[in-house]
């Protein structure tokens, strides 16, 4: 008899398969397989809101609609290229509104929600997510807005990683510190590139 897995079970299997890649995001996702981490999520949300504020006031958040948006992440009706294309077209506009810290928190919440489902999250959790995320643009063409935000975030991470690699190859300690590395991390990054080139 064929056993049909639900989409969330498939997603959890995909994340489990990522363990061969040792990156900060993969480590965070693997930790989420054990627990959704709501307490830490909302401690981080308090810090973010205190620093950057909300994009939509709480009284203007439609919790039911936001919940549907989150569930859509498990049943995306468009192709990956459609998401990448929308994210490229609106990247500049997104980056004017969404800081890397906001994008990071939204990514964190969306993955916890997708891996564990709405039953682990209360309406107030979805309310906070909706207020931090803000309104969905009207011209999404079935592209989940959170998927587009995650795509922009991934692009920023890749750009930073490329900049770190180039600065490390040049031995540019000051450049690495400007990119956010501590002096110790910068020296290790340079040493790693040097070892790899020998």
Image (cartoon, rainbow, N blue to C red):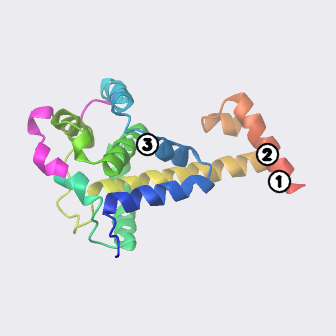
Residue 114, image x, y percentages: 32, 51
155 and 63: which is toward the camera: 63
Residue 93, image x, y percentages: 33, 53
Query: Label 2 crowding class (10 Å Cα cut-off): few <14, some 14-19, many 20+?
Result: some
> The magenta stretch spans which residues?
52-67
Q: Quadrant of residue 3?
A: bottom left
Indicate which disc residue 192 carries: 2
Which residue is located at x 50 percent, y 46 percent?
Answer: 30
- What element does badge 1 sit on? helix
Is residue 115 visible in the rendered image? The answer is yes
Q: Is residue 19 left or right of residue 104?
A: right
Label 1 close to label 2 by CB (< 8 Å): yes
Q: Residue furthest front?
A: 1
Which residue is located at x 77 percent, y 37 percent?
Answer: 188
Is residue 180 highlighted in magenta?
Answer: no
Is residue 55 visible in the rendered image? The answer is no
Of the numbered discs 2 and 3, the one sitting upstream in the chain is 3
Residue 163, image x, y percentages: 64, 50
Q: Is residue 43 above or below residue 131?
A: above
Indicate which disc residue 32 carries: 3
Q: Which image quarter holds the N terminus? A: bottom left
Q: Is residue 162 above or below residue 80?
A: above
44 and 182: which is toward the camera: 44
Query: Label 1 crowding class (10 Å Cα cut-off): few <14, some 14-19, many 20+?
Result: few
Q: CA distance from mark 1 to mark 2?
A: 6 Å
Residue 29, image x, y percentages: 47, 46
Is residue 63 highlighted in magenta?
Answer: yes
Q: Which image quarter holds the C terminus? A: bottom right
Q: Is residue 109 above or below residue 124?
A: below
Q: Residue furthest bottom?
A: 1
């Amino acid at each position: 008899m064929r056993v049909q897995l639900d989409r969330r079970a498939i997603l959890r299997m995909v994340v489990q398969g990522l363990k061969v890649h040792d990156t900060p995001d993969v480590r965070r996702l693997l930790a989420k397989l054990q627990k959704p981490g709501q307490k830490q999520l909302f401690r981080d949300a308090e810090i973010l809101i205190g620093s950057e504020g909300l994009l939509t006031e709480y009284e203007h958040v439609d919790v039911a609609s936001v919940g549907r948006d989150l569930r859509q992440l498990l049943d995306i009706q468009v192709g990956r290229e459609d998401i990448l294309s929308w994210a490229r077209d609106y990247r500049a506009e997104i980056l004017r509104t969404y800081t890397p810290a906001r994008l990071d928190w939204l990514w964190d919440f969306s993955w916890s929600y997708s891996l564990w489902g709405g039953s682990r999250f209360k309406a107030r959790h979805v309310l906070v997510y909706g207020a931090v995320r803000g309104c969905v643009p009207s011209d999404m063409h079935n592209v989940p807005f959170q998927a587009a935000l995650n795509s922009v975030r991934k692009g920023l991470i890749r750009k930073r990683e490329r900049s770190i690699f180039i600065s490390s190859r040049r031995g540019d300690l000051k450049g690495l510190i400007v990119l956010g590395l501590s002096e110790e991390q910068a020296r290790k990054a340079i040493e790693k590139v040097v070892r790899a080139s020998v």
